Amino acid sequence: MIKFEKTFRQARILNHLKNFEEDTLTFEYRADPLTGRNTTVIKGMLNYVSRFLTSDQELINTLVEKTKATCPFCPENVRTKTPMFPKDFIPEGRIFVGDAVVVPNLLGHAEQSVLTILSKEHYLRLRDFTSRMLLDAFEGGAEYLKRLRRAAPSYFPVFIINYLPPAGSSIFHPHMQILARDKPFYLVRLYLEKSKAYYENHEICYWKALVDEKGDSVRHLFEINGVEWLVPFAPLRGLNEAQAIVKGKSNLLEVKNEEWIGLAEGLTKILRFYDEQGYVSFNAILISGPLDEHLGYFDVNLRIVSRPGIQPLCFTDAWALPYFLWDGEAVEEPEKLAERIRNFLEKAR
Ligand SMILES: [Zn+2]
């Protein structure tokens, strides 16, 4: 059994909204069951920050037009304004799957740094992301990893989506990044180390145990083709964070077509929920163990969060506490978020 640990602390204030009567503020601290990292749940915070999460549609339209003029990822420019892979690595220069195009990143973030352009459209509302589009992008990414594995077997890959400037993207046009290093990114290393220790201590894979909890878990969302979707007990960042686990697959080359569909369809469900809430921007990560071995103690998994809206007031949720102090904060109880997502999906059926 996984331990879901919560502790509560309180502060007393004289509340001016209640005629300076004594009031008690409650803080809920949650330890991530795998890493022990703290996430503070602050009830009422979602309501407080919600005015920063909506967007100015006119401003978006202006930015779409402005950025389109010089966009290297629009279909008329992609063959002349993006780099190509060396012929001895990928003879065709770029990988095309449906509308997805995989190209090298000119200014990358790791020794293997690649972009997958997701769509011919320069701008998409979150409800416009389709399963087909995401599936093509994943297949393009997996094809790139296959070629990489042939060239050099030992890599730790991640797929990343930063969509629109509030999520850190410098280019509007929807795209996914594929980064691969011979050493894992810090979070991946932490998960691998902690998962291994959990396996040694409990004789079960943490990720399997987490999924098996779903029967009585109020945070479970849905399952598609062996991919389980849930809201994490202690979110990493906290704005509408959801998580997916690809059961029994420890690296991205082990993921089968059905499971890629499970990831793509699940993502579109979450994105439709975000869209309905008025959000326009998101980050997602899909993390993997090493490509050259199967690990019985680790499963490929994904996280997605919504980001603030596009407004003249440039509010960011990447403030000092999560950014520097590495603590988590949830703007509402994860169980409530799970309930809201489930209700939305039930209604949308
Ligand atoms: Zn474009």
Image (cartoon, rainbow, N blue to C red):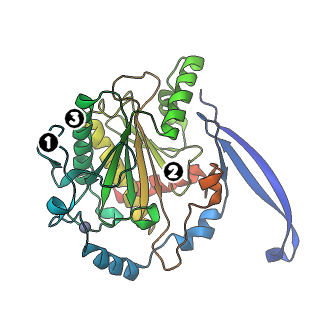
State the image coordinates of residue 242 (x, y, percent, origin top left). 47, 49
Mark whose residue sits in front, 2 or 1: 1
Q: Secondary structure at mark 2?
A: helix
Q: Earlier in the sequence, mark 2 or mark 3?
A: 3
Q: Which residue is identified by label 1?
A: 87
Q: Amino acid at mark 3?
A: Arg
Whether pointer 2 and pointer 3 mark residues with C-beta atoms closer than 8 Å, the reply is: no
Q: Residues within 10 Å of mark 3 (few under 14, many from 20)?
A: few
- Label 2 within 8 A of ligand 1 by Cβ: no
Whether pointer 2 and pointer 1 mark residues with C-beta atoms closer than 8 Å, the reply is: no
Q: Please state if 243 lies on the left or on the right of 13 as rendered.
A: left
Q: Residues within 10 Å of mark 1 (few under 14, many from 20)?
A: few
In this view, the residue in front, 208 or 217, is 208
Residue shown at 24%/40% (left/top)? 144
Q: Is residue 347 visible?
A: no
State the image coordinates of residue 86 (x, y, percent, origin top left). 18, 43
Q: In the picture, residue 10 is in which quadrant?
A: bottom right
Q: Is residue 330 visible?
A: yes
Q: In the picture, residue 173 is in which quadrant?
A: bottom left
Is the residue 34 above or below the residue 240 in the image? above
Q: Amino acid at mark 2?
A: Ala
Q: Which mark is residue 147?
A: 3
Q: Amino acid at mark 1?
A: Lys
In this view, the residue in front, 169 or 130, is 169
Q: Secondary structure at mark 1?
A: loop
Q: Which mark is residue 338?
A: 2
State the image coordinates of residue 236 (x, y, percent, origin top left). 56, 48
Residue shown at 17%/55% (left/top)? 99
Q: Where the C terminus falls, by quadrant?
A: bottom left
